[in-house]
Image (spheres, grey):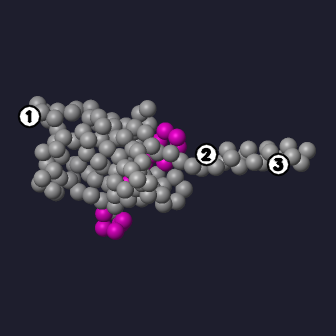
Amino acid sequence: MTILRAAAIALALLGLTEAASADPKGTWLTENGRSRVKVDDCGGALCGTIVWLKEPNDPETGKPKTDKNNADASKRSRPLIGVPIVLSMKPNGANKWSGQVYSPEEGKVFSGNLTEQGPNAVRLEGCAMGGLICKGQNWTRAN
């Protein structure tokens, strides 16, 4: 009985460890459904890149949308598909990663967090003013 009990406890702990080890890698549909972001490992940190846009072309020009609001003028002509928006996120507690977030709408980089809320849901937040003002989106797994 003792060996069986120890094995049962070990299996239960293994199950808890697997449940506790979050994995936000994959492709995510943004809250507004306008884009998909692929999150992957980048040298021990998480990074995420725009891989799909619901409306990939600029209605004014008919050409692919670009990073036209970027504070760095040399990056304004790059296509939005392929732009990294989740930057250098490192583990910061249970199911949470902290780093930076790039907002193409504002053309700025903010401090940010990615928090896994379940196997098919994450929340991405970008913060300004030392974390006093934060905005976020809930994303759902696309794959």
Q: Secondary structure at mark 2?
A: helix
Name the N-terminal-most of marks 3 and 1.
3
Where disc 3 sits, the SS reads helix
Residue 15 appears at what percent x and percent y? 67, 44
Considering the image in quadrants, where does the N terminus appear? top right
Give the amino acid type for the residue marked by disc 2 in the picture.
Ala
Q: Please give the range of residues in magenta.
A: 116-132
Instruction: Mark 3 vs mark 1: give the one in front.
Output: 3
Mark 2 to mark 3 CA distance (whole Å): 20 Å
Using the image as rendered, state which of residue 81 and residue 56 is in the foreground: 81
- Image quadrant in which the C terminus is located: top left
**Which-is-in-front pick, marks 2 and 3?**
3
Q: Residue 64 appears in which quarter of the rendering?
A: top left
Q: Examine the rendered structure and indicate whether residue 56 appears above or below residue 112.
A: above
Residue 116 in sight from this viewpoint? yes
Circle 3: residue type: Ala
Q: Residue at x 22, y 49 (%)?
A: 105
| Closer mark to the observer between disc 1 and disc 2 | 2
Residue type at tag 1: Thr
Q: Residue 6 — which label?
A: 3
Q: Nearer the viewer, residue 87 or 106?
A: 87
Question: What residue is pinned by disc 1?
Answer: 61
Q: Earlier in the sequence, mark 2 or mark 3?
A: 3
Query: Which residue is tagged 2?
Result: 19
> Could you tell me which secondary element the residue under label 1 belongs to?
loop
For image coordinates 30% across by 59% down, the residue present is 110
Q: Earlier in the sequence, mark 1 or mark 2?
A: 2
Residue at the spot x=15%, y=56% of the render? Answer: 72
